[in-house]
Image (tube, helix red, strand yellow):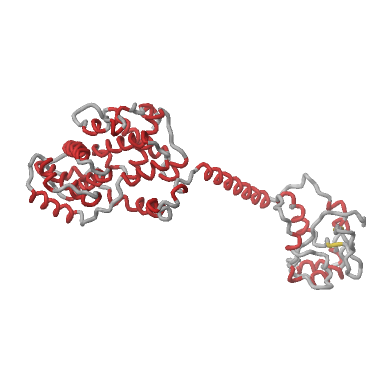
Amino acid sequence: MGDSKKNYLGPVMPSSNLQEGSRMEGVKPVKQMAHHHRRALSNINQNIIGATLKPCVVKKSDCSGKNVARGNNSSFVAPRPITRSVAAQMVQNCPEVFSGAKQMSSLALNPSNQIDRSIVEEEEYEEDSDTSVPMFVKHTEAMLDEIDRMEVEMEDSMVSVMDIDSFHVKDPLSVVEYIDDIYCFYRKTENSSCVSPIYMTHQFDINEKMRAILIDWLIEVHYKFELMEETLFLTVNLIDRFLEHHAVIRKKLQLVGITAMLIACKYEEVSVPVVEDFVLISDKAYTRKEVLDMEKLMVNTLQFNLSVPTPYVFMRRFLKAAQSDKKLELLSFFIVELCLVEYEMLKFSPSLLAAAAIYTAQSSLYQFQEWSKTSEWYTNYSEEQLGECSRLMVTFHQKAGSGKLTGLYRKYNTLNFGYAAKAEPAKFLLDLPH
């Protein structure tokens, strides 16, 4: 047997089974052989195969069982051919290493089946680049590569998503510690603020056109009273939720509108307009008592459930994610308020309306599709999901200045609102494949 050194790892046995003075003394425990860097499995497949097929390979030692040390380099070579006595002793001392202990014992005790000397020749341990890699090694390597690729992609995507709350950590009004939980709650409960998109079929004396006229007029009233933005969105929500459950004659529809705005003002405003103001704005079509009676009827029908997420709460968060300026903010609100007038937009959730309004406004201002990874992350909507809603918004934008319902257009065609209504509609979105 030659003395040339081979970089071959023999069978690995648990460290708990290594006894001092054992014939397997040369085999190192797993922890001692661990490397700091993960090696490719294809580079050690020969060791795996060798450990399975050639359990006779051990560290070179003399007959007394003491290791033959050669500096810091431990040499692994093939020992003499296995005889019956050697095989029996190996099986007896290390049964864990040899899973087929009984077969090995019978092999060792049977002279006719004694292992051929060629098995342990040195050339058998030469690395062969043509040796086929076991299938499980290939699969494991593929899995590891896929995990590494996914980790890199995840890191890249996270880098492109900006933390929009990092600059407001010290602002108590931003409630950075709870903001994610708050909007998670909004997303879970927003369906409670939605109404059936076909509820008008249950109304016998009013239709969607009358609803549009009412809301267009209320937008002007809201502007005249200089109310907060969220008041308008809650007003429209209260009207739709009430009409879904209660049939109303057309003579009382305006009364429902001003009463809904009165309730919304009490819920949202600091300085609330008095009942007489609403009676006056309706040209005294209703009395104070009628307004108060309708207020009782509405809050009881709605079971005093006024804490519902409207598109407004999502608009503020999504505009922050879009890193909006004043121009984008005004155009986004113009587009989403156009949707308040349109009955067919009731089929979309508040969060989707808010995200689509910002996406449409960006496309209108820049005249190309603009939807960043940050916006997609915080809205949970991709461009594809916004497509249908956005195209409808473009059509509303195109006809906003024409027709009879121009209250919203006149509102946003003023200096206070940056003449947002004059922005060019994103017509190219209509030509994109659906």
Locate residue 49, reporting x and y percent: 75, 55
Locate residue 4, reporting x and y percent: 90, 54
| Above/below status of 283 relative to 185 | above
Left or right: where 58 falls relative to 338? right
Q: Depth check: 433 or 363 in front?
A: 363
**Is residue 319 something one can see in this rendering?**
yes
| Above/below status of 169 relative to 362 | below
Q: Quadrant of the C terminus?
A: top left
Left or right: where 312 falls relative to 371? left
Q: Residue at x 24, y 53 (%)?
A: 306
Left or right: where 137 falls relative to 295? right
Left or right: where 272 falls relative to 388? left
Locate residue 32, reporting x and y percent: 76, 62
Q: Depth check: 301 or 275 in front?
A: 275
Q: Residue at x 23, y 52 (%)?
A: 267
Asked which quadrant contains residue 81, the reply is: bottom right
Locate residue 189, reporting x and y percent: 32, 53
Asked which quadrant contains residue 392, the reply is: top left
How many numbered markers are drawn? 0
**Is residue 360 something one can see in this rendering?**
no
Q: Depth check: 138 or 147 in front?
A: 147
Q: Quadrant of the N terminus?
A: bottom right
Q: Depth check: 190 or 204 in front?
A: 190
